[in-house]
Image: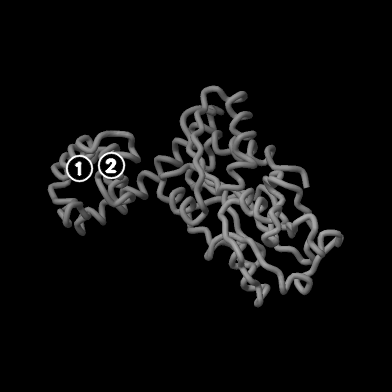
Amino acid sequence: MLNLERLRVLHAVATTGSVVGAARLLHVTTSAVSQQMARLEQETGTHLVERQGRGIRLTEAGTLLAGEAAELLAHVERVMATMAQHHGLVTGDLTIAAFPTAARALLPSALRALRARYPELTVSAREQEPYEAVPAVRRGLLDLAVVEDWTGDPLALPQGLDHRALLDDTYDIALPPDHRLAGHPTLSLADLGDEQWITSSDGQLCHEWLVRNIKRARIAHTASEHPTQLALVAAGLGIAIIPRLGREPAAAPVRFAPLVDAPRRRVFAVWRSTSTARPSIGVVVDALIEACPVA
């Protein structure tokens, strides 16, 4: 009979692409991974990995068994989640990732509440963009992620993931206090065509929205973090489009004006469908919702 833990090691090697990656994922040594793989090859009577340069790759038999292992481990996770639900236990370890704004605005409050309510639950958090976090959840490298997409530009979620909406976040225009438009109650795209902009890097949501909707947009400066963008706005170096979630005071006064037909992003939590029944998933999602600002 095949050993479940050895199949878990094979799945980790397949998921991460290396013995080192598998060891990090499983929190064991590389020698332990190699030993488990050797024993699994003895049990199956076939080679599961082969050398490729300085690393390894799965053989055809290894790839076949890794696929079966993934299905088996998913079933085991589903069974364990169901049993945890039956007992109502909120225990164990859980890993969560969030994109930077949500990590700053939601995670501190949510994690504090979880620690107070569920002392036997350990939640480890990291900052990670959705394009990295979603595959990591699917592959089992994370238990849950807070991600975002924009109205009209939905984030494609792979099969096997569940999700729950946390909030809709609206964007406003940030202007220097002495800007000619600073006193306007609302602004339209037509008002902003000739402005110099401060925005995120090429490829990020704000940048893509800007170049798509304002054809003549002149991008003067780029910065990944919104506090940096606001500091540049406060210095009179341009204007920016900034989300309301997690908005922080700038280094100097900045005026905010609502934008007609402003873009909105949807913020939501995702996790593997096989772990939906885990009480810990439910309480973490509830804590995230509680941490969301009231609209």
Indicate which disc, 2 or 1, sits on the residue closer to the N terminus. Answer: 2
Amino acid under disc 2? Val
Q: Are marks 2 and 1 in contact (CB under 8 Å)?
A: yes
Q: How is the image coloured?
A: one colour
Residue 244 horizontal side relative to residue 69, left or right = right
Q: Which residue is mark 2?
A: 9
Furthest-bottom residue in this view = 215
The residue drawn where x is 63% and y is 71% is 218
Instruction: Give the image quarter of residue 209.
Output: bottom right
Q: Which residue shows up at 75% across the image and 52% down it?
A: 254
Where in the figure is residue 61, as x and y percent of width and height? Answer: 20, 56
Residue at image coords 31%, 54%:
67
Please state the horizontal and vertical placement of residue 82, each as a whole percent of the image: 50, 36
**174 in relation to 37, above or below:** below
Specify the quadrant of the image occupied by residue 280. Answer: top right
Count residues near mark 2 (Cα–Cα under 10 Å), then give few for <14, some for 14-19, many for 20+. Answer: many
Please tell me how crowded label 1 is: few (under 14), some (14-19), or many (20+) other residues with Cα within 10 Å.
many
**Vertical arrangement, residue 110 with respect to residue 270, above or below:** above
- Residue 205: tell me if it is visible: yes
Q: CA distance from mark 2 to mark 1?
A: 7 Å
In this rendering, the answer to whether 44 lies above or below 222 is: above
**What residue appears at the point 22 percent right and 35 percent down from the top-left corner?**
32
The x, y position of residue 268, in whole percent, is: 61, 50
x and y, in percent, of residue 55 in the image: 20, 52
Can residue 155 be seen at all in this image of the molecule?
Answer: no
In this orientation, which residue lies closer to the viewer: 152 or 42? 152
| Residue 37: assigned label | 1
Disc 1 residue type (three-letter): Met
**Picture layout, residue 204 above or below residue 104:** below
